[in-house]
Amino acid sequence: MTLITLPQLNQIIADRRLLPIVKGDLATTKQDEANFQLVMKQMFLGLPVKPLLKTHPHMGRWIRQIKKLAPELFQPKKKLLIDTQAIAPLAENAFIQVHANIGFRRGIPRLYEWAVRRPNLNWQDRIKLWAACEQYSISPQQVQLVDLALHPSKPARRVKISWSQDRHEQTQQWLSQVISQSHEETPARAQIEQSILPMLDLESILEVTI
């Protein structure tokens, strides 16, 4: 069995330049982002976060913004799986593994992403949505992603993104092509761009700012 993780997919895409390289415009570092994810995880697990917040005081502002934008996450009876693992079969003996924050509303999973990022859907979000549908055997039309997009200096935004059967199937097809291309020694870049990039029509996915 071949288990492919999101970091491995990221490396495949970076090595073979399967997606356009977009330079970030948010003043944050990978270490800063990792520390914030650790703060959030420890907070939901009931572990102390004061030492980290003392070292990184700006993260306290981000936490306050998240509490304001998504108060349902902090309800005592809210069932929320933090950084939980989802594994979905892609092909025979091949599986995709992701980690996501998943809440449940009447038994239906809802994904939450909080990070210093742009408030729109990216390819990692697509894979997480696809994997969650496969993991829990849920119709794509029922699943949503709540994007809590933080910014170093601007107010945070909450964007709710709906999923669909068409996007679900396109993502699975895109994943299959990426994996199959990764096993070829010298793939033609033009052919990859023509066959894979049109599937990532992120602009057409319904986004609702709340």
Image (spheres, rainbow, N blue to C red):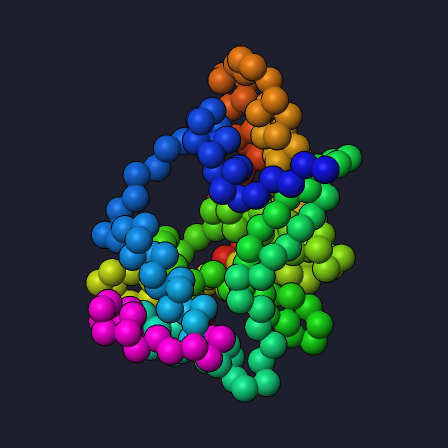
Residue at left offset 67%, top offset 50%:
87
> Horizontal placement of 66 versus 94: left or right?
left
Magenta part mainly helix, strand or loop?
helix
* Place of residue 183 in the rendered image (x, y in percent of width and height, measured from the top left): 61, 22
Does 209 sit above or below residue 48? Answer: above
In the rendering, at what x and y percent does residue 166 appear? 67, 45
Seen in the image, is 3 located left or right of residue 120?
Answer: right
Work out whether residue 26 or residue 15 is closer to the camera in this orientation and state it. 15
**Residue 137 visible in the current orientation:** yes
For the record, the magenta segment spans: 44-61
The quadrant in which the C terminus is found is bottom left
Q: Is residue 108 left or right of residue 84?
A: right
Q: Residue 80: x, y in percent? A: 57, 73
Looking at the rendering, which quadrant does residue 70 occupy?
bottom left
Residue at 68%, 62% in the rendered image = 142
Residue 178 is drawn in which quadrant?
Answer: top right
Expressed as whole percent of the image width and height from the top left, the position of residue 34 reads 36, 57
| Number of callouts | 0
Which image quadrant: the N terminus?
A: top right
Residue 207 falls inside the magenta stretch: no
Q: Taking the image as drawn, is residue 204 in sight?
A: no
Residue 2 as seen in the image, left or right of residue 146: right
Q: Is residue 121 above or below residue 60?
A: above
In the depicted structure, whether residue 210 falls above or below residue 204: below
In magenta stretch: residue 57: yes
Q: Image quarter for residue 150?
A: bottom left
Q: Residue at x 32, y 50 (%)?
A: 30
Q: Residue at x 41, y 69 (%)?
A: 40
